Image (cartoon, helix red, strand yellow):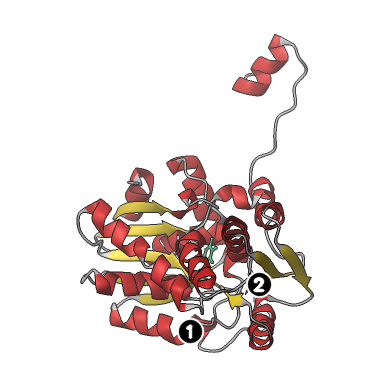
């Protein structure tokens, strides 16, 4: 989608790729449909993953559809409400780990070493094969590659997949990856033990695809930088109020990065997940609702702001 308000503010020709339009509301579906299909092909009866939320929602949905059992391990109290609801509705066993995402990923790796279940985190190569299709779509839809692709970076599977897609399409836009300041291991060059950010989907301190992501960004002559939570929420509100697009906070990190650091030419910002995933952050950062008695004068004042 073209983004006129964002183009005006940034001075670039900005477009938004709405990954929230995927079946479960995030880009994770692109890879999950492939990974779960492969698991079925290999005879697995169950899939497991560690997740900050969207992988869990997607794995649960595709497992349900394939008739597989699903178990998802999430950091306790740290995943957005909508994502938790999705995983539960699709019948997955949801394990609330008293630890963070990085510990959850470590534990599911151990779990699959001990049991015949398929791991569907983005360390699974089928996930990358599915996710690279985002790059094909962007080039097909624009009629050519963009100059720059802005994308939030968490476990770094997505930025890896976008680059693989562009390489296969024989194009080379610059990749601009953005981490949240409180969870920016690649930017800092060292793992972050207790990652913290409002953007729960990228609250990751030790990305599994760190090296591939660094290679992708270097090969594309791109950059990876950090943005603050305040900048993320500013971009999040700007998208909602000025572009009419509701994404989740992590998705706004790519836009926040564009606004802080700038870019040149035609820029695609990947909005990785839908805003409805995280109603708590939405309500906390929005204006309050306006109460009114059921009388026209009251409603006039409340609705139109007159005295
Ligand atoms: C998973 C996710 C990310 C981060 O993707 P990685 O592959 O972990 O880098 C960003 N935004 C949203 C909404 C996500 O669900």
At 63% from the left and 67% from the top, the residue drawn is: 52
Is ligand 1 less than 8 Å from the beta carbon at label 1?
A: no
Residue 157 visible somewhere in the drawing: yes
Q: Secondary structure at mark 2?
A: loop
Q: What is the quadrant of residue 128 in the picture?
A: bottom left
Q: Which one is closest to the eye, mark 2 or mark 1?
A: 1
Where is residue 58? Give x, y as percent. Answer: 57, 60
Where is residue 295? Give x, y as percent. Answer: 74, 11
Where is residue 270? Give x, y as percent. Answer: 41, 59
Q: Compared to 33, does 303 lie above or below?
A: above
User: Which residue does the numbered mark 2 point to in the structure image?
Assistant: 196
The 10 Å Cα crowd at callout 1, few under 14, some 14 to 19, many 20 or more, is: some
The 10 Å Cα crowd at callout 2, few under 14, some 14 to 19, many 20 or more, is: some
At 66% from the left and 48% from the top, the residue drawn is: 279
User: Which residue does the numbered mark 1 point to in the structure image?
Assistant: 210
State which tag comes first along the sequence, 2 or 1.
Answer: 2
At 66% from the left and 72% from the top, the residue drawn is: 196
Q: Secondary structure at mark 1?
A: helix
At 63% from the left and 22% from the top, the residue drawn is: 303
Q: Compared to 211, does 70 lie above or below?
A: above
């Amino acid at each position: 989608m073209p983004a006129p308000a964002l183009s005006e503010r940034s001075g670039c020709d900005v477009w938004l790729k709405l990954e929230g339009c995927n079946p479960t509301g995030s880009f994770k579906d692109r890879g999950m449909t492939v990974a779960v299909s492969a698991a079925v092909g290999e005879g697995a009866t169950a899939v497991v993953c560690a997740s900050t939320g969207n992988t869990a929602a997607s794995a649960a949905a595709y497992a349900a559809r394939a008739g597989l059992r699903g178990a998802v391990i999430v950091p306790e109290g740290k995943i957005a409400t909508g994502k938790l609801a999705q995983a539960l509705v699709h019948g997955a066993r949801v394990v609330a780990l008293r630890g963070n995402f990085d510990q959850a990923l470590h534990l599911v790796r151990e779990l699959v070493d001990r049991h015949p279940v398929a791991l569907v985190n983005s360390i699974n190569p089928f996930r990358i094969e599915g996710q690279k299709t985002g790059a094909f779509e962007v080039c097909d839809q624009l009629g050519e590659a963009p100059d720059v692709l802005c994308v939030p970076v968490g476990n770094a599977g997505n930025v890896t997949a976008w680059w693989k897609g562009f390489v296969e399409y024989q194009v080379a836009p610059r990749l601009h990856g953005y981490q949240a300041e409180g969870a920016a291991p690649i930017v800092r060059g060292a793992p972050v033990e207790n990652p913290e950010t409002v953007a729960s989907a990228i609250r990751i301190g030790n990305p599994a695809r760190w090296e591939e992501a660094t290679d992708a960004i270097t090969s594309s002559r791109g950059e990876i930088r950090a943005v603050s939570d305040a900048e993320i929420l500013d971009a999040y509100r700007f998208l909602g109020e000025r572009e009419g697009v509701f994404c989740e906070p992590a998705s706004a990190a790519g836009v926040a990065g564009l606004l802080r650091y700038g870019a040149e030419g035609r820029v695609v910002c990947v909005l990785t997940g839908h805003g409805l995933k995280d109603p708590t952050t939405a309500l906390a950062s929005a204006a309050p609702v306006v109460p009114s008695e059921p009388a026209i004068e009251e409603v006039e004042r409340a609705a139109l702001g007159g005295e």
